[in-house]
């Protein structure tokens, strides 16, 4: 699996958009970009994933650059409940999920 | 989607004893995985639980310490054997399912078992 690089921590004001970056410069053509988050003391939760097109669901938006070497997860209106560790992972389907250290997002009132 | 039930949710165990953690899924899944999350750390894959054959262990994990069973497509167990305080961690079960209408997949995780060894 390609390696990802994320900032260790970020702060975001409640109600504002949280933009979480991820670099994956060695991603291969058949690898997807997945985002998960882990709220304290819970199991990781799937957020969104994409291959090359931008994606949006009820939780977030995923923006992938044209060269696919980086992506940004956008939480449009962050709430206190979005405080969590966010993991960016690149992988093919039916492969083990390898977690990096992620970004610890703190939403501030 | 898949709903995963993990038991127990937490336990405090004496060193030298063993604990078996159960993972039950509400649907048949091809792939099941066991992870460990040490305090303040990210998740580390222990092994892939294979139905009908021996589990596939990652580097640093061995069958004698973490025996795994996978008797069918909805159930697996992980045993933490001869425990020491260093085994105090959260242990998580994960399954992989195919997303509807596509070739890619989605991973679901249980809520984990918080183990403290004293």
Image (spheres, grey):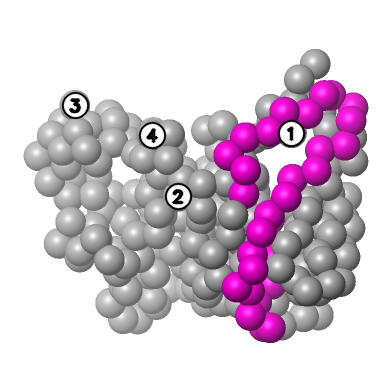
Rounded to the nearest angstrom, the CA distance separating label 4 from label 1 is 21 Å
Which chain's residue wears label 1?
Answer: A
Residue to which mark 1 is pinned: A82
Instruction: Tell me the residue at 90%/27% (across/down).
Output: A15
Rounded to the nearest angstrom, the CA distance separating label 4 from label 3 is 15 Å
Q: Position of residue A33 (x, y in %)?
A: 69, 66
Q: Assess disc 2: are there few (<14), some (14-19) or many (≥20) residues with their C-alpha within 10 Å of its C-alpha.
A: many
Mark whose residue sits in front, 3 or 2: 2
Please report contact status of discs 1 and 3: CB closer than 8 Å, yes or no.
Answer: no
Rounded to the nearest angstrom, the CA distance separating label 1 from label 3 is 34 Å
Quarter of the image for the C terminus of chain A: give it: top right
Residue to which mark 3 is pinned: B118
The answer to whether residue B75 is left or right of residue B15 is right
Rounded to the nearest angstrom, the CA distance separating label 1 from label 2 is 19 Å
Q: Position of residue B22 (x, y in %)?
A: 39, 52
Residue B71 makes an appearance in the image: no
Q: Assess disc 3: are there few (<14), some (14-19) or many (≥20) residues with their C-alpha within 10 Å of its C-alpha.
A: some
Instruction: Tell me the residue at 62%/43% (across/down).
Output: A7
Count of marks, rendered view: 4
Q: Position of residue B67 (x, y in %)?
A: 23, 62
**Magenta stretch bounds:** A6-35
Question: Mark 3 or mark 4, which is nearer the start of the sequence?
Answer: 4
Q: Assess disc 4: are there few (<14), some (14-19) or many (≥20) residues with their C-alpha within 10 Å of its C-alpha.
A: few
């Amino acid at each position: 699996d390609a390696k990802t690089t994320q900032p260790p921590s970020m702060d975001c004001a409640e109600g504002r958009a949280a933009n979480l970056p991820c670099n994956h410069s060695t991603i291969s053509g058949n690898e997807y970009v997945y985002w998960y988050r882990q709220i304290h003391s819970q199991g990781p939760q799937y957020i969104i994933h994409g291959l090359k097109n931008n994606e949006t669901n009820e939780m977030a938006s995923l923006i992938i650059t044209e060269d696919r070497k980086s992506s940004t997860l956008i939480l449009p209106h962050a709430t206190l409940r979005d405080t969590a560790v966010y993991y960016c992972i690149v992988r093919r389907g039916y492969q083990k999920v390898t977690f990096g250290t992620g970004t610890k997002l703190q939403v501030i009132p | 989607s898949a709903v995963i039930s993990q038991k127990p949710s937490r336990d405090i165990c004496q060193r030298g004893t063993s604990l078996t953690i159960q993972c039950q899924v509400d649907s048949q899944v091809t792939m099941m995985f066991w992870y460990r999350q040490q305090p303040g750390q990210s998740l580390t894959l222990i092994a892939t639980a294979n139905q009908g054959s021996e589990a596939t262990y990652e580097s640093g994990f061995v069958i004698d310490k973490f025996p795994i069973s996978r008797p069918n497509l909805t159930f697996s167990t992980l045993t933490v054997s001869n425990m020491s305080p260093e085994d105090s961690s959260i242990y998580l079960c994960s399954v992989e399912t195919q997303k509807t209408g596509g070739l890619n997949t989605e991973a679901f995780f249980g809520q984990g078992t918080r183990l403290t060894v004293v």
